[in-house]
Image: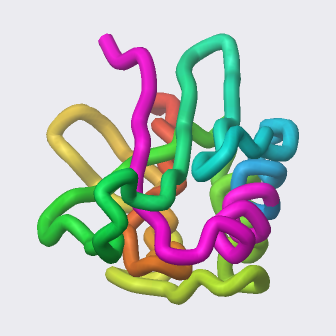
Amino acid sequence: MFSHIMIGTNDLTKAKTFYDAALGALGIPAGAVDRHRVFWRTPTGVFSVSLPIDGQSATVGNGGTIGFACQSAEQANAWHAAGLANGGTTCEDPPGVREGANGNLYLAYMRDPDGNKICGLYRMPRV
């Protein structure tokens, strides 16, 4: 459905350090810098951060969340820990299982250094 997701940043170096660590915990190679942007390319899509082209400050969208697929609860925890160690801040409840109508999810929420809300999500098998 999506070709890519791009969010704004006010500090390209800080954002690259943060996402290289957090996405690296998911097995995604370091991002590639292209002028005022950084791209992390995978077979399932592209994630990018960019300095705003209009020269204004990047701001956070209220109510938005970007979810990154994890292969296990342990990987979600590693993603969360890598992000926190590289400038992220925890938000929502601590990482853990959330029960839902479509099955249980293991969720790990945090905010990146620019304040964007992101989530590591593992869809748990039904038992």
Q: Is residue 72 above or below residue 79?
A: above
Q: Nearer the viewer, residue 89 or 93?
A: 89
Residue 13 magenta-drawn?
Answer: yes
Name the residue located 59 percent from the left edge and 82 percent from the top edge: 88
> Across the whole image, how many numbered discs are drawn on residues?
0
- The answer to whether residue 74 is visible is no
Q: Is residue 98 above or below residue 59?
A: above
- The answer to whether residue 111 is visible is yes
Residue 29 magenta-drawn?
Answer: no
Q: Where does residue 113 sit, x and y in percent of width and height?
A: 54, 81
Residue that protrudes farthest toward the front in the picture:
55
Q: Nearer the viewer, residue 74 or 112?
A: 112
Q: Where does residue 56 sit, x and y in percent of width and height?
A: 29, 71
In the image, taking residue 37 as reference, residue 83 lies left or right, namely right
Quadrant hosting residue 3: top left
Q: Where does residue 117 sit, x and y in percent of width and height?
A: 36, 68
In the image, taking residue 115 as reference, residue 62 lies left or right, namely left
Name the residue located 46 percent from the left edge and 78 percent from the top edge: 114
Name the residue located 48 percent from the left edge and 60 percent from the top edge: 51
In the image, taking residue 56 as reference, residue 42 lies left or right, namely right
Name the residue located 16 percent from the left edge and 40 percent from the top edge: 101
Q: Is residue 1 above or below residue 84?
A: above
Quadrant hosting residue 116: bottom left
Q: Where is the N terminus found, in terms of image quarters?
A: top left
Q: Nearer the viewer, residue 70 or 110?
A: 110
Magenta part of the protein: which range?
A: 1-20
